[in-house]
Image (cartoon, grey):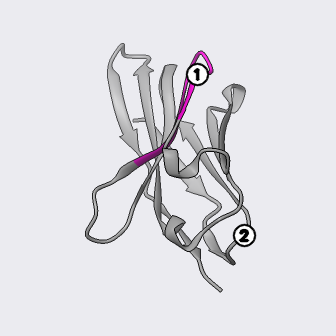
């Protein structure tokens, strides 16, 4: 079973920075993509950033220029560097992974979520 463990959320003041991490473990053959989504109460989960195995990235317009997604392929870990944080970035952030397992199955896996609160 492929599992994701997230870390790095917390409380930060507006204009501050946080770095989220998400480590994948289990019967991983090849990762297709890794990404971050976020959700606030009463709203749908939305894509924040994603990166493919080839290194192509995609960002939500609201975070372009402020957030950077990156990976450590050797560690099956994805990071989200968040700078110039705004109160509207407050949300639960979820890691998402598209992966081929050693049993030749394709799975989309979600992390448990980590809360980011931007407030003075």
- Residue 103 is one of the magenta-drawn residues: no
| Predominant secondary structure, magenta span | strand
Residue under the point 57% across and 19% down: 53
Residue 107 location, x and y as percent? Answer: 34, 28
Residue 60 falls left or right of residue 110: right
Secondary structure of the residue carrying tag 1 is loop
Is residue 5 depicted above or below 118 in this figure? above
- Residue 51 is one of the magenta-drawn residues: yes
- Displayed quadrant of residue 69: top right
Disc on res. 15: 2
- Displayed quadrant of residue 20: bottom right
Is residue 65 depicted above or below 16 in this figure? above
In the picture of the structure, the residue carrying the numbered disc 1 is: 56
Residue 39 location, x and y as percent? Answer: 38, 61
Disc on res. 92: none
- Circle 1 crowding by C-alpha within 10 Å: few under 14, some 14–19, many from 20: few
Secondary structure of the residue carrying tag 2 is loop
Residue under the point 74% across and 69% down: 16
**Range of magenta residues:** 47-58
């Amino acid at each position: 079973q492929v599992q994701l463990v997230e870390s790095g959320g917390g409380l930060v003041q507006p204009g501050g920075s946080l770095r989220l991490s998400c480590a994948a473990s289990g019967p991983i053959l090849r990762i297709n993509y890794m990404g971050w989504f976020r959700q606030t109460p009463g709203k749908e989960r939305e894509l924040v950033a994603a990166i493919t195995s080839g290194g192509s990235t995609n960002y939500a317009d609201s975070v372009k220029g402020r957030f950077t997604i990156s990976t450590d392929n050797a560690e099956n870990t994805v990071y989200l560097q968040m700078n110039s944080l705004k109160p509207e970035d407050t949300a639960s952030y979820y890691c998402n992974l598209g992966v081929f397992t050693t049993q030749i199955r394709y799975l989309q896996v979600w992390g448990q979520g980590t809360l980011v609160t931007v407030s003075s």
